[in-house]
Image (tube, rainbow, N blue to C red):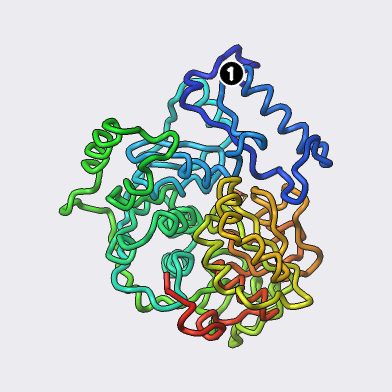
Amino acid sequence: MLRARGLRVAMPERTIATVDHIVPTRDQRRPFLDVMAEDMLSALERNCREHGIRLLSLDSGHQGIVHVIGPELGLTQPGMTIACGDSHTSTHGAFGAVAFGIGTSQVRDVLASQCLAMDPLRVRRIEVNGRLGRGVYAKDVILEIIRRLGVKGGAGFAYEFGGSAIDGMSMDERMTICNMSIEGGARVGYVNPDETTFAYMRGRQFAPQGDAFERAAAWWRSLASDRDARYDDVVEIAASEIQPNVTWGINPGQSVAVDEKLPANADTEALAFMGFAAGQTVKGTRIDVAFVGSCTNARLSDLREAARIVRGHHVAPHVKALVVPGSQAVREAAEREGLDRLFLDAGFEWRGAGCSMCLAMNPDRLEGREICASSSNRNFKGRQGSPTGRTLLMSPAMVAAAAIAGEVVDVREFVGAEVLVGH
Ligand code: SF4
């Protein structure tokens, strides 16, 4: 589009490219067997060369899902406005950035002008206070929020997350929460930058270094919302009320606690598609595929939590199970800890970095009516490649437990108290 108008990229030094949706995760050698994926990547390489844009390609050592590599490289920083042609850009708001997904024509506008016209958002503060129970993770928190407020409840809003449960979370956990804000209809998810944020960022490749970091941190601290800030809406949730959640339907708001009965007034279209009946529990549902991956839950801490569940067990014989790290760096760090061996010995596939089975733009797909226990973020009809395939969203620990049991289980019952550490 820029070429057709004779335009250049306005600020190539503020523009970063990577490749995630289309890359195969089993064999990443070039050229890809999928001709369309190979053509797309070749075009991206040409365009980045022509416009002087940094491309974090497969041979860079930094390739991965854009919402994983931005933070891990220190490219994502508090106070930034970040736009990306992908809805889950809300992830980066975990750092106190204002970050949102944009459409293709808006990508053109940003590349050409570094500007974007958009309406101001209202702000809803979502406070989660107290301690999360054993076996309850950030994924459960955001599923609970979307369940309570609805998949369209956030339309026109930015969601600012706070409260003692959020304040006590790691950056990985905050990213999981902000990542799925878009699934609740909010364009932006946001957490105030704090000492946890700065500790995560310190020393990262593209973060300010030395004295410059201290100066930046002083400014970042000043960006946090005032204690007496006024919000357009405030929602409070007690952390102790949140259980391990699992979706039963065809949008991320259709979730229940794993041992809770499906509501009597549950959407009939969703029930029919999923093969569930009102009054039953999702617990006990036989699964065909288990997927630990995606920009929601494929960071090192997610893999560690899944590994804690898997240790000493084996995947059920009828289950195909894969672990797909969110980035090459996550994969390497996991391998340094021996997590690859642990997963492989337990019968999981250990893949290269990419989006994999989160969506159907690469060879990893469901077949027919298969049911997938998935740590991803969307359970729409057809999302995982088969028009009739069924997705159950849950935390990576729950996915790992389901892979081993061969059916959906309550992670709290699956392993002893000594293994589970809560969020
Ligand atoms: S992991 Fe899934 S949701 Fe995230 S960027 Fe990739 S395809 Fe999109």
Quadrant containing the N terminus is: top right
Judged left or right of residue 109, residue 31 is right
Q: Eyeballing the image, is 273 above or below 328?
A: below
- Please name whichever residue, 106 or 288, is drawn nearer the observer in this view of the structure: 288
Judged left or right of residue 421, residue 7 is right
The residue at 60%/81% (across/down) is 409
Q: Is residue 62 visible?
A: yes
The amino acid at mark 1 is: His
Residue 337 position, x and y percent, is 56, 59
Quadrant containing the C terminus is: bottom left
The residue at 29%/58% (across/down) is 233
The residue at 47%/69% (across/down) is 140
Residue 293 position, x and y percent, is 61, 58
SS of the residue at dot 1? helix
Residue 43 quadrant: top right
Q: Eyeballing the image, is 356 above or below 213?
A: below
The residue at 59%/84% (across/down) is 281
- Please name whichever residue, 12 or 62, is drawn nearer the observer in this view of the structure: 62
Residue 119 quadrant: top left
Residue 122 position, x and y percent, is 33, 48
Q: Eyeballing the image, is 231 above or below 47?
A: below
Q: Which residue is mark 1?
A: 51
Farthest residue toward the left?
228
Mark 1 and ligand 1: say if the CB distance to the nearest ligand atom is below 8 Å.
Answer: no
Residue 250 quadrant: bottom right
Q: Residues within 10 Å of mark 1 (few under 14, many from 20)?
A: some
Q: Is residue 264 visible?
A: no
